[in-house]
Image (tube, grey):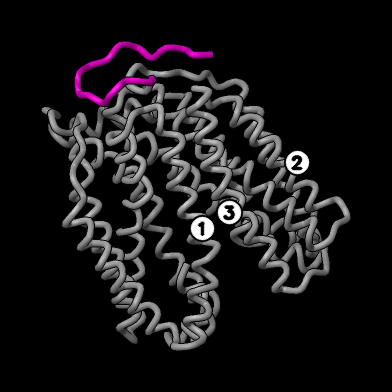
């Protein structure tokens, strides 16, 4: 996120064109996305502590490297290192939650992890933008890199490895990776849930992450500040919706129909913003609602992992996340292409947002909901071979 906060200055510093700067910034995602499946496999096979330490250290050093050099090649290496380190963060959090806490708390706690990320996106951009305006981007980057090293030191001192199947794994790493990938990639249900997650999260990638501000300015005649405020409501809504959705799902013991109704209501909220006449206030309220119901997308991780034993949680969560990230690489330029094709009609191009939400809801109706006995109330993670999962529909 940081390079986008002062894109023009950083591009001039490295003597890059707009497309060159875009390539530099995108290096983060080009390593982050393929690393997801690697992260899942190593967490399940070796545990989390050493990789959380590696990731936090690499991320901090990558940011410091980017800020400390005037060489585009070294700066690019720093960006790659940042993406490599950050690739461990989200999946390791879900893995630790699964093995540290009771299974009936997974949806709530994973929602809380997402909420922290959304609040960071909503607040961090404003705080960092103001800091960059005051002291410059290099100083801010150096400070955030130093904070990253402090987080590494904190994890080194206080992070403990939870009990997990990784403790008693007796297969070789190559054999384990092959068998895990065969199980996950060969499961059509996991593929279906991954596609649901991709389509359900698409509004955040497309509307909140790229084109929403442009649409609000062009079609709703909002000022840039008002449009950015409206888009920020999506992140605030997701922060609250992730926690509420997780709590309600754990209370009910079900995920599927919350995902179904959440996707439907998300699509309706975005459709209302796109096609109903409104004001800055009404648009902001609708975008908050879109984010709130969009927060239930986090339940797709619980749905996917609960059909298998705990030894595959990292690999499954990483696979679902990787598919979702890959979707952004497709849909962000696709919406821009549709807008160009229609003469700059972002309202029409962004109709893909509620359409994708509707397709996600439709697919969810046909996905069976299973609960492995390690993921039922009162169960704890373990390493022994388990019986087949139970259909809880």
Looking at the image, is mark 1 or mark 2 earlier in the sequence?
1
According to the image, label 1 marks what residue? 119
Residue 77: in sight, yes or no? Answer: no
**Where residue 55 appears, x then y in whole percent?**
27, 57
Whether residue 182 sits left or right of residue 306 in the image: it is left
Mark 1 or 2, closer to the camera: 1
According to the image, label 2 marks what residue? 268
> Which contiguous range is marked in magenta?
376-393
Residue 334: in sight, yes or no? Answer: yes
**Where residue 20 appears, x then y in whole percent?**
49, 76
Q: Residue at x 23, y 16 (%)?
A: 385
Whether residue 390 sits left or right of residue 378 in the image: it is right
In reply to whether residue 380 is colored magenta, the answer given is yes
Kindly state the secondary structure of the residue where label 2 is placed.
Answer: helix
Mark 3 or 1, closer to the camera: 1
Label 2 crowd (10 A; few <14 / some 14-19 / many >=20): many
Residue closest to the eye, 8 or 383? 383
According to the image, label 3 marks what residue? 205
């Amino acid at each position: 996120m940081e390079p986008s906060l002062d894109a023009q200055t950083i591009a001039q510093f490295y003597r890059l064109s707009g497309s060159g700067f875009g390539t530099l910034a995108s290096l983060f995602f080009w390593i982050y996305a393929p690393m997801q499946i690697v992260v899942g496999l190593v967490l399940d096979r070796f545990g989390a502590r050493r990789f959380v330490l590696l990731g936090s250290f690499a991320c901090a050093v990558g940011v410091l490297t980017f800020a400390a050099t005037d060489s585009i090649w070294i700066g690019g290496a720093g960006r790659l290192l940042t993406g490599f380190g950050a690739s461990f963060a989200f999946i390791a959090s879900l893995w630790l939650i699964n093995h540290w806490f009771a299974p009936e708390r997974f949806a709530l706690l994973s929602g809380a992890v997402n909420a922290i990320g959304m609040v960071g996106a909503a607040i961090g951009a404003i705080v960092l933008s103001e800091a960059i305006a005051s002291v410059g981007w290099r100083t801010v980057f150096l400070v955030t890199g130093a904070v990253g090293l402090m987080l590494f030191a904190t994890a080194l001192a206080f992070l403990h490895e939870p009990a997990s199947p990784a403790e008693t794994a007796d297969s070789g790493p190559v054999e384990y990776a092959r068998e895990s990938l065969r199980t996950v990639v060969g499961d059509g249900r996991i593929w279906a849930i991954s596609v649901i997650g991709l389509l359900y999260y698409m509004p955040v990638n497309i509307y909140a992450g790229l084109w929403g501000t442009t649409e609000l300015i062009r079609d709703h005649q909002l000022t840039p500040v008002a449009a950015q405020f409206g888009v920020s409501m999506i992140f605030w809504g997701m922060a609250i919706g992730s926690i509420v959705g997780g709590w309600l799902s754990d209370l009910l013991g079900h995920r599927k129909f919350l995902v179904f109704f959440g996707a439907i209501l998300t699509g309706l909220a975005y459709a209302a913003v796109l096609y109903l006449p409104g004001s800055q206030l009404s648009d902001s309220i609708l975008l908050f609602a879109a984010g709130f119901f969009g927060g239930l997308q986090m339940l797709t991780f619980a749905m996917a992992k609960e059909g298998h034993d705990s030894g595959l949680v990292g690999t499954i969560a990483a696979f679902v996340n990787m598919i979702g990230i890959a979707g952004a690489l497709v849909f962000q330029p696709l919406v821009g292409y549709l807008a160009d094709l229609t003469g700059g009609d972002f309202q029409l191009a962004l109709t893909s947002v509620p359409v994708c939400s509707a397709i996600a809801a439709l697919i969810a109706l046909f996905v069976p909901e299973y609960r492995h006995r390690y993921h039922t109330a009162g169960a704890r993670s373990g390493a022994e071979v388990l019986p087949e999962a139970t259909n809880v529909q």
